[in-house]
Image (cartoon, coloured by chain):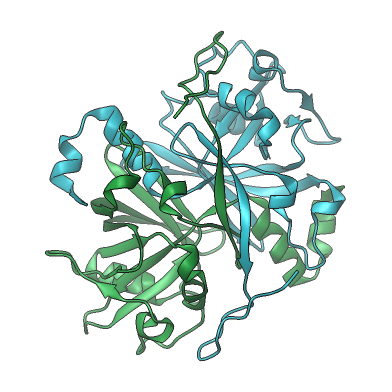
Chain colours: A green, B cyan
Amino acid sequence: MLVKLSTLDSWERFYRSNFINSLTGFKSTGLIGTINHHGKTNLGIFSSIVHLGSDPSLVGYINRPRKAAPHTLANIESTGSYTINHILPSFIEKAHQTSAKYPETVSEFEEVGLTPHFIEDFPAPFVRESLVKYALTLQEILPIRTNDTYLVIGKINAVQLEDDFLLQDGFIDLHKAGSVCSNGTDHYYKTVPLARFKYAKPGIKPKIIEK
Amino acid sequence: MLVKLSTLDSWERFYRSNFINSLTGFKSTGLIGTINHHGKTNLGIFSSIVHLGSDPSLVGYINRPRKAAPHTLANIESTGSYTINHILPSFIEKAHQTSAKYPETVSEFEEVGLTPHFIEDFPAPFVRESLVKYALTLQEILPIRTNDTYLVIGKINAVQLEDDFLLQDGFIDLHKAGSVCSNGTDHYYKTVPLARFKYAKPGIKPKIIEK
């Protein structure tokens, strides 16, 4: 079927939102951990995390309009620090529950039953249960004026992972790590490796890299 | 293991790049189809596609520095039109091969053996072999000055997909569609559904939505 703009615009709000939200593909999902100046921790699930570059090591995520998703953004602005924590199948239910609209005075860590974990010299909390996680220092917040969202850009400060997820060439085996991806606002998936290819060059047939 | 910034900075360039490139999670991957003013088509694989909002329907992708990835961006700036096409396991090799640095005068469609497909009133080519694909009109290009990359923002103009991928509530079943995701610059994955949850509310245990 071909869905034209006029059809899209005629659809009921939730139907249309499900459609558009699932269209862009499987999403990089993680739990963002922050803390406010009173020492109250916050944890929220975000599904629009995007690699921006390796040198410097920059990661972005999309924050919805301030009214819809205020706490994580405010804490990052206030402290300059946050963590991103991969989600495992064993706690997807808890991770999803962080999307509920809790008041600023409660910590999602306590509400959903995940454990804050701090490392030396970094103020924002990690999720102890997560096996791949990283600390970020705020670099820049780019407003996307068309829809009042923000691209929040952070520089990687530290990474915590299990030793045996790391392959010889530096690649992190996220399939082995069990990290989930998502689609739409409420579907979660695990992955199955298909292939890894060598660096592509014009005129040369792609080669699969064997394990 | 805990990898601190000083360790990250000491790593060899490719090792570090593999590490950072795989850290952010599984990626939304697609083939971006464009055309230049001489009618030459272009096709490139991009793995940092991100949903920005459903109303208006906005999708972003990260374009690397202009020197490293010039053609897709130039065509989008020149025509204002592009398509994003999901990748199937049956043509991941061809999709990966579009990442080779071909000169501007050749079309990756011809080089890798994928078929351009045009719909009425839209200048940019789709990939015929793709089963979920959408047309975008350029809205805005946000420069990310820290590393000379760009967030390219488009508004969805039309969507093409097989009827039976569409669920009753508007959600597109990308697992059924067979769309792949990726990690790093060269790993491709298929997915296995884990669970779908109801909209989360404070104080209510998350409920799985059964199929």
Compare residues A145 and B166 and report the one nearer the observer.
Answer: B166
Using the image, determine if residue A32 lies above or below residue A111.
above
Residue plotted at (45% across, 40% down): B150
Q: How many marks?
A: 0
Q: Is residue A132 visible?
A: yes
Q: Residue B153: horizontal and vertical position, in percent?
A: 56, 47
Occupied quadrant, residue A19: bottom right
Is residue B105 rendered to the left or right of residue B119? left
Q: Residue at x 61, y 49 (%)?
A: B191
Q: Is residue A125 left or right of residue B198?
A: left
Identity of the residue drawn at 30% across and 69% down: A128
Where the C terminus of chain A falls, by quadrant? top left
For residue A176, above or below residue A79: above
Residue B208 horizontal/vertical position (percent): 64, 76
Q: Residue at x 36, y 85 (%)?
A: A110
In the image, taking residue A60 as reference, residue A181 lies left or right, namely right
| Residue B144 visible to an observer of this rendering | no
The reply, left or right, for residue B169 in relation to residue A169 is right
Seen in the picture, residue B100 relative to A16 is either above or below; the reply is above
Q: Position of residue B43 (x, y in %)?
A: 63, 25
Q: Relative to residue B91, is residue B22 depicted above or below? A: below
